[in-house]
Image (spheres, grey):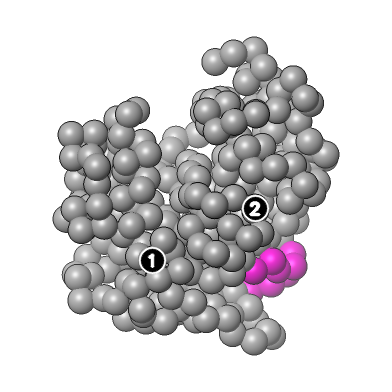
């Protein structure tokens, strides 16, 4: 870890706990993907929390348009930020609350470098359970859409928190591509999505991550991988309640209080 990476990570963690940043200083700002991931690793290391798995972002047209980036990226799921559904979270504990309804996979075996390149078909045997999930996007930046994608990746992929619904182990009969996902914030109209919005198939997102992480050892049994949003990202207020209903899989819910 370089000095600039360590300083950037410390600055991002401090901003998450207090006043948000306009941007990282120029000499700490990652200029490419490798630099962004180096800062992200420093953030996770300095946070000192156990990692529970991975998040994949920017896996569909809505997120690509919002972020101005045409490929996925990843961040880490941290133990203190993971919650079982139905979750009740402090609304003022986030600078923003952008919600995404996602298919999450619990791995029953490793997806290591020996099996690469992985495909949607070959990763399926490693999936021990499929879960409905809601990711809460949050950021260290005052205006997250103004700082550029590499600064967002450095900020642990703008991961804020994660709500995990009950898993289904006998999942092979589920339609992960075309099955309807209905997301609704209380008092608002429902928003519909499907797994096809996630790189065409949430298993393709899992395969992308397995290949991307293969040089550093890949994915491990027991980890959770949340694969990207089935719906356009949904910003909500500090006292909102939301629920996502995944056809054949079940529901996941979060309330901000």
Q: Is residue 245 above or below residue 41?
A: below
Which quarter of the figure is the N terminus placed in?
A: top right
Residue that numbered label 2 is attached to = 68
Residue 90 percent across, percent down from the top left:
68, 58
Q: What residue is at 32 percent from the left and 72 percent from the top? A: 176
SS class, disc 1:
loop
Q: Is residue 236 above or below residue 246?
A: above
Q: What residue is at 26 percent from the left and 76 percent from the top? A: 174
Q: Which mark is residue 200?
A: 1
Which quarter of the figure is the C terminus placed in?
A: bottom right
Give the magenta-colored segment's residue range. Answer: 234-241
Is residue 79 magenta-colored? Answer: no
Q: Is residue 230 above or below residue 185?
A: above
Is residue 237 magenta-colored? Answer: yes
Residue 214 percent across, percent down from the top left:
31, 34
> Is residue 151 something one can see in this rendering?
yes
Mark 1 Cα shell of 10 Å, populated few (<14), some (14-19), many (≥20): some
Residue 80 percent across, percent down from the top left:
52, 44
Residue 141 falls in image quadrant: top right
């Amino acid at each position: 870890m370089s000095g600039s990476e360590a300083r950037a990570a410390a600055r991002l963690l401090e901003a998450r706990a207090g006043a948000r940043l306009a941007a990282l200083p120029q000499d700490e700002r990652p200029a490419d993907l490798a630099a962004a991931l180096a800062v992200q690793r420093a953030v996770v290391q300095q946070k000192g929390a156990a990692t529970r798995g991975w998040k994949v972002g920017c896996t569909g047209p809505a997120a690509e348009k919002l972020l101005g980036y045409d490929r996925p990226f990843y961040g880490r799921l941290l133990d203190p930020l993971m919650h079982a559904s139905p979750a009740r979270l402090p609304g003022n504990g986030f600078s923003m609350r952008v919600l995404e309804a996602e298919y999450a996979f619990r791995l029953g075996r490793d997806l290591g470098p020996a099996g690469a390149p992985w495909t949607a078909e070959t990763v399926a045997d490693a999936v021990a359970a499929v879960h409905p999930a809601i990711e809460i996007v949050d950021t260290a930046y005052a205006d997250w859409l103004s700082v550029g994608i590499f600064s967002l990746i450095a900020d642990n992929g703008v991961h804020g928190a994660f709500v995990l619904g009950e898993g289904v182990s006998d999942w092979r009969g589920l339609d992960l591509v075309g099955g309807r996902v209905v997301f609704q914030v209380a008092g608002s109209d429902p928003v519909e999505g499907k797994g096809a919005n996630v790189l065409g198939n949430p298993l393709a997102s899992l395969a992308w991550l397995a290949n991307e992480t293969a040089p550093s050892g890949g994915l491990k049994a027991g980890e959770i991988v949340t694969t990207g949003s089935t719906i356009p990202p949904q910003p909500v207020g500090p006292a909102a309640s939301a629920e996502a209903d995944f056809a054949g899989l079940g529901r996941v819910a979060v309330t901000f209080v």
